[in-house]
Image (spheres, rainbow, N blue to C red):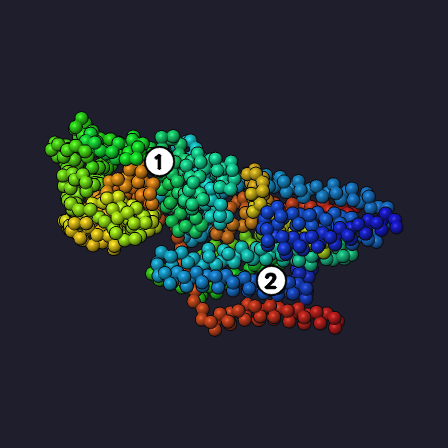
Amino acid sequence: MNDATNRTVVASVAVAVGSAVTAIGAIVALPLFGASLLGLAPLVVGALLLIGGSLLTPSSSSSSSSTSAAPSRWRVSRLAQLVGPVVLVAGLWGVRGLDVAGLEHDVTAAQTNTLAEESVAIARDIAALGTDVVVVSFVDDDRARAELATLLARYRAIAANLRFEERSAKNAADLDVARALGIAEHLALGGPNVVVVGHDDAIPPVRLRYVAELPDREQLFTNALRRATSATTTRVYLLSGHGEPDTRDEGPLGLSRLTTSLAARGVQLVPLPLSSVGRVPDDARGLVLLPALTPIDDVEQAIVVAAVDRGVPVFVAVEPDRPSPLSTRIAGSVGVDVVDDVVVDESPFAAMLGGADVANGQTQLAHAVTRSLRGALTHFPRAAVLGLTPIGDEADVVVTPLVSTGGDARAQKTKAEGPLPLLVGIDRTAPTKTRALVAADASFLSNVELGKGANSDLALNAVLWLTSTDDLIVVRPHTRTGALVFLTPAARERLSFVLLVLVPGLLLAFAAGRSAARRAR
Amino acid sequence: MFALLRRDLSLLLLSPGGIGLVALWAFLVGAVFMMELAGFEQAEQRALALGDPAILALLDVNDLLLASLHNNLAVTLLFLGPLLAMRAWNDGPARDWLLQRAPSVAAFVVARSVAVAVVVAVLVAVTLALPVFLASVGRPAVGQTGDIVDAGQALLAAFTVALAGTAFVVVAGAIVVVIDNVLAGALVAFLVLMIAWVAPGGSALVGPDLTTVLQLVSPATHLEAGLRGVVRAADVAFFVVVIVAAAAATTATLAGRRR
C-alpha cells in the first residue's frame, strides 16, 4: 500500500470512530451527565477525530486534481484560514467592550425589562456613594442565577460600583466566604443565599433568600440595597436599673444573643437606666419593658407612660411570678389584660416538648411578624394568661394574637380554655400612630430559650416590626397583563392537526410532486 | 451575484430537498408550540385553582410561552443549521464552475450567505403566525386589561432567532468548506455549535475567568436578552461578528484552493 492509501485508511477509521464516539456522546453521555466533564468529553474527542479524519481525507471537490500539487495547495489554504479566526477574535474583543458598555434598549410596550422609578432612585443613590457595594450570591440553581444576574445588571447599568460576585456553596473556598458573611449554616437549610455588603463597615450586611421566579424580586433587592447602604441606625431602649435582664449578659438568662442578632439587622438594643437619664431619648424607635426584680418608682413610671402616650412603640413582656404594675398598666392601655394566672398544657404532646408549664405557640400565618416562621412552633416557659379587651375605635386599633397556644392548653386558675394568646401585636393609628407588643412570657427572649424552636426568628421579627424597620419601599415593577388561553379539546385537536399533519404533509407532498416532475423531465 | 443568490434561493427553498427541510422545520415548530401551549395551560389551571389575582397576573404569554418557544426554535436551528449548510454547500464539481463565473470568491460567499439568511428569515417569519394566533384566542386574566401579546417583544425575538440561525448556518457552511467533506463537515459543525451552546453550563469545571470567556462565545448567552425584549448592542454585534468571521474563513479557504 502506498502513502495515499494508508492516509485514506487512517482517515476512514478516524471518521468512523469519531462518528460513533460523537453519537454516543450526544445520545447517551450528554443527556446523562449534562455539561460536565463526562458529558462533554465524548463530544470533544469525537469532534477531534472527525476533524482529523476529515483533514486527512482526499478533497471531494478536487479529487481529480494532481497529487503533486496538494502540498502547495494546503499551505496556502491553511494560511488563508487564519483570516476567519483573526476576525472572530478581534470581533469578540469588540463584543466584550460593548457588553461592558451595556448599550441596550427595552422594546417591550410595558417596559418590563426596565427598573421601576423607586429602584432607579436607590440605584442612583448607590452610584453617588462612589465606593463599592457588593452583592455576594450563593444561588446554585441555574435559572435563579440567570434571573438574579439579569436583575442586577439593570441596577449596575445605573450604579457601576455595584459589584456582583457569584459563588457556590459546593466550593470549599466559597464556603469560607459564606462563613465570614454569617450564612454558611443557612445555605444547607434553605435560608438566606444572597448577601448585600454595603460601603460602610458600621452597617451590617443584608441577607436575603433568592429563588427562581420570585414575583417581588425587584422590591426585595431594592429594599436590600437601601438597607445595606443606609447609615441610619435604629435604637430600641430596654428599661434597666431594676434588675431587668442585661443586654451584655452571656449567661442563660441574659440577652446577649438577642442583642447580637438585632445588631446584625441594624437595630441596637440599648439599656436605659431611667433613674439617671431621666427621659426616654428622642431617637427611641422602641421601648422594651421586661420583668424587674425591684419596684419601679412613680416618676419613672410616669416617664414611661408619657413616652408610650406620645407614640413610642413599646414591647411589654410579663412573667406570672414577677407581676409589674407598670407592665400591666401599659398592656392594659393597648387592650391586653394581664391575668394573674399561668398557662398549662397537660397534653402528651406538650409533655414531650418541655412539660405542662411550657406553652407551645402556634403562629398566625398572615402577619408580618410570623409569616416567615411558616407555622413553626415557639416555646414560652411559664406563660402568663392574657386577655384581649377592645379599646378605642376598631378602625384605629388592630389587635392581633400573633402566637397562641393550642386547644389543649388552659389557664391554671380560671380554667379558661385554649387557644390562649401568648404574643399580641397592636397596630394603632389614632390618636397617635404606634405599635405595641405584649408577650405572656419574658424568658423566651433569654439566651437559653432563644435557640428553641422558632423563638429567635419570632423575637427578631417582633422587634423589627415594632420599630417599623420591616417597612419596605413599595416598588411597582413594570409588569404586563396576565393572560388566559382557553382552547376546547376539539380546538386543540384541530390546531394539532394543522400544525403537525396538514402543513408538513402538504409541504412534503409538494416536494414529492416536484421531485417526480423533475425525474419525468 | 444576484444570479447566484437567485440560484441558491431556488435550490434551498424550491428544490424537493429544500421543501423537505421546510416541512421538517414546520413539523418541529408545531410540536414545540403544542408542548409550550400545554405547559402554559397547566400553569393556567394551577393559577385558576388558587384563584389569587397576584398569581394570575404572572401568567404572561410573552415570557412563559413565546420566549420559551423562540428559545426552543433557536435550539432547533442548532440541528437544522448544519443540515441547511449541507444542502447549500453540496454542489460538488459545480462549485468550481460557479466560482469561475462569480465576480469574486467574496461575492460568491456573500451571495450564498445572504441566501441562507433569507431562507432562515423566511422560516422564522412564518412562526410569527403563532403570536398572532395567541393574540386572537387569549384574553386578559381576571380583572386585567390590555393586549396579551407584546408585538415588540415577539418581533425582536423572531429577529434574534433569525440572526442566530443565520450565524449557525454560515458557521456550519464554513466548517463544511474548510473540512471539504459535506457529511463530516455538517457533523463537526453540529458538534461545534452544540458545544458552544452548552459551554456556559460547564462553569463548575473551570474558573471564573474562563467562565466569562465561555459565556462570551456561547450563542445561548447572546439570545437571552433578545427573547425577553431587550436589544443589546453586544448581542447583535456577537452574531454579526460570527457571521462575518465565518464568511471570511469560507472566502479565504475557497480563495486558497483556487490558486
Which residue is at 59% across, 51% downward? Answer: A33
Marked residue chain, label 2: B
Which residue is at 51% across, 50% downward? Answer: B224
Which residue is at 45% across, 59% downward? Answer: B61
Horizontal side, residue B22 vs residue A342: left or right: right
Q: Which quadrant is the C terminus of chain A positioned in? A: bottom right
Marked residue chain, label 1: A
Cα distance between the residues tagged 2 and 1: 57 Å
| Residue A347 can be seen in this image | yes
> What x and y, as percent, mark residue A268?
29, 33
Q: Residues within 10 Å of mark 2 (few under 14, many from 20)?
A: some
Q: Residues within 10 Å of mark 1 (few under 14, many from 20)?
A: some
The residue at which mark 1 appears reads as A264
The residue at which mark 2 appears reads as B25
> What x and y, as percent, mark residue B86?
69, 57
> What x and y, as percent, mark residue A80?
73, 42
Q: Amino acid at mark 1?
A: Ala
Task: Point out the residue furthest to the top here.
Answer: A276
- Disc 2 secondary structure class: helix
- Disc 1 secondary structure class: helix
Q: Amino acid at mark 2?
A: Trp
Which residue is at 30% across, 35% downward? Answer: A252
Q: Quadrant of residue A181?
A: top left
In front here: A327 or B212? A327
Task: Point out the residue furthest to the left here.
Answer: A298
Q: Nearer the viewer, mark 2 or mark 1?
A: 1
Q: Is residue B100 above or below residue A473?
A: below
